[in-house]
Image (tube, rainbow, N blue to C red):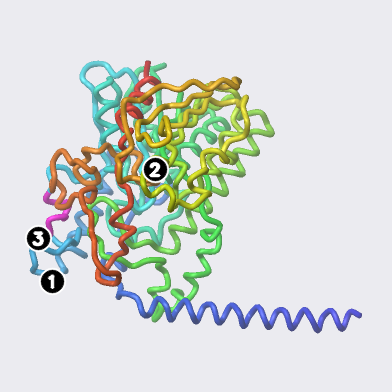
Amino acid sequence: MLQRTRFWLRRIAILLTIVLLVLLTLRVAMTERGPALQLWHTWLPDELSDSEMDNTDWAGYLQNEQQIFVQMKRNVSDKIQDSSGETYNRYAENSPVYPGHFATDWNRSYQLLPKGKPRGAVVLLHGLTDSPYSLRHFAVDYQQKGYVVVAIRLPGHGTVPAALTQTEWEDWMAATRLAVREAHRRIPAGAPLQIMGFSNGGALAMKYALDALEDPALPAPGRLILISPMIGVSSYARYAGLAGLPSLLPAFAQSAWLSILPEFNPFKYNSFPVKAARQSWLLTRALQSQLHREQDSHLLNKLPPVLTFQSVADATVSTPAVVRGLYNLLPANGSELVLFDVNKSVRLSPLMRPGALHAADNLLPPPPRNYRVTLVTDATPGSSAAVAQTTPSGSTITTSVPLGLSYPPDVYSLSHVALPFPPDDSLYGRQPEHPGEFGVSFGMLTPRGERSVLMVSLDMLMRQSSNPFWPWMRQRVDQTLQ
């Protein structure tokens, strides 16, 4: 019997090895047919390590950041031979999307200081492949309300996508701690401190707040504002590292990338390395583990209120994970979850997948709940006028308030990337206040044509990139400051 078991175990091991080799061969074949790696896929900036960030201050971080941008110009931009002034390449100096020519390069860390004595401070944490640009509108609003704003460029971002091939999630956490130290230093004792995080930055904000419960030496935030937070990601990200195995051999370096695309966005990478996907999964795993551990130890009862804005349609992070992996674990501490529903009044609604059309109906446990829920949805069938349907914490009664805002008639849902940008954002807005301010206005593009003509997918260009309900969303954030 033992001999027979060993026989079958050997056969299974051989079969699995063959399957793995076939998959790796297919992976190599697919990547070798793709675009060639460019300078921005191979040059690596010299970022500070997590221990170095824990032992430096804001000025030290900015000094290293400046050195990185100087090195990037020398090693990437100065070596590009493209002489065309119309190429959309963020690394070419003569390109209209070259960030170095803008009045402000929003790829860099920045601070905004209010007039007079600060009322409080906020730390802004951007998302994966993103830059400090993504939360700049909230930054201005916080500054006008008397808050110090500290917006840090997280390691691996704002420079070249290759930087994400060497960055660990612990580096992002060290940068978060540094930014919070700086914000805390800037305000009077006892003044409120908030952390706002978008996408991956939402996971970092949440993780920092949990760390502060366990470590009294960390300045504790009084409130968290999360926008499309990365509480859970696709299970594929768990095994993304396997896709990069062939890249251990220099001849197959392209296998280290899940996508290699033109870099035409001045403030966000289009190319995406395998390691970034793996690090996002590791961060969410650590976050989930800590949430459950602190719930069991009752530390979670000391967590500050969390206000989250999340689209029910999100192809980047898991909306159910926001509900089940975070909100259903929270104590009754004044937290609120705001969900943006799909536009059921749009003519495309008969073409929507049933799961998307009724996503809002299946996400939440029945009331009463420990947290307040607000659903932004269309009021009546056939009408695009939006209302906020709110169910308070501990209640089963839902009230409805008109927002005075409507879904655009050609928008069937918001998206992961849309929430932090107002309709008049110069880069992503549908009605940009300053069209072409950053060389291109993505929100105005309405491409039509045949497949396989463009170098990028139509999804990338047509994805909803601004939030028609941003003015109301800003008001909800402002209410947390009162």
Mark 3 or mark 2, which has the lower sequence index?
3
Label 2 element class = helix
Label 3 element class = loop
Magenta residues, start to end:
95-101
For image coordinates 46% across by 75% down, the residue present is 248
Q: Which mark is residue 94?
A: 3
User: Is residue 463 at all visible to an observer of this figure?
Assistant: yes
Residue pointed to by mark 2? 175
For image coordinates 19% across by 43% down, the residue present is 426
Residue 263: x and y in percent read 25, 61
Label 1 element class = loop
Magenta span includes 100: yes
Mark-to-mark CA distance, 1 and 3: 11 Å
Q: Give the residue type at disc 3.
A: Asn
The mark closer to the camera, 3 or 2, is 3
Magenta span includes 150: no
Above or below, 159 against 345 in this view is below
Q: Quadrant of the N terminus?
A: bottom right
Q: Give the residue type at disc 2.
A: Ala
Kindly indicate whether the residue at mark 2 contacts the one at mark 3 (C-beta within 8 angstroms): no
Residue 343: x and y in percent read 40, 41
Label 1 packing within 10 angstroms: few (<14), some (14-19), many (20+):
few
For image coordinates 13% across by 71% down, the residue present is 81
Camera-nearest residue between 462 and 216 = 462
Camera-nearest residue between 127 and 163 = 127
For image coordinates 12% across by 43% down, the residue present is 103
Residue pointed to by mark 1? 81
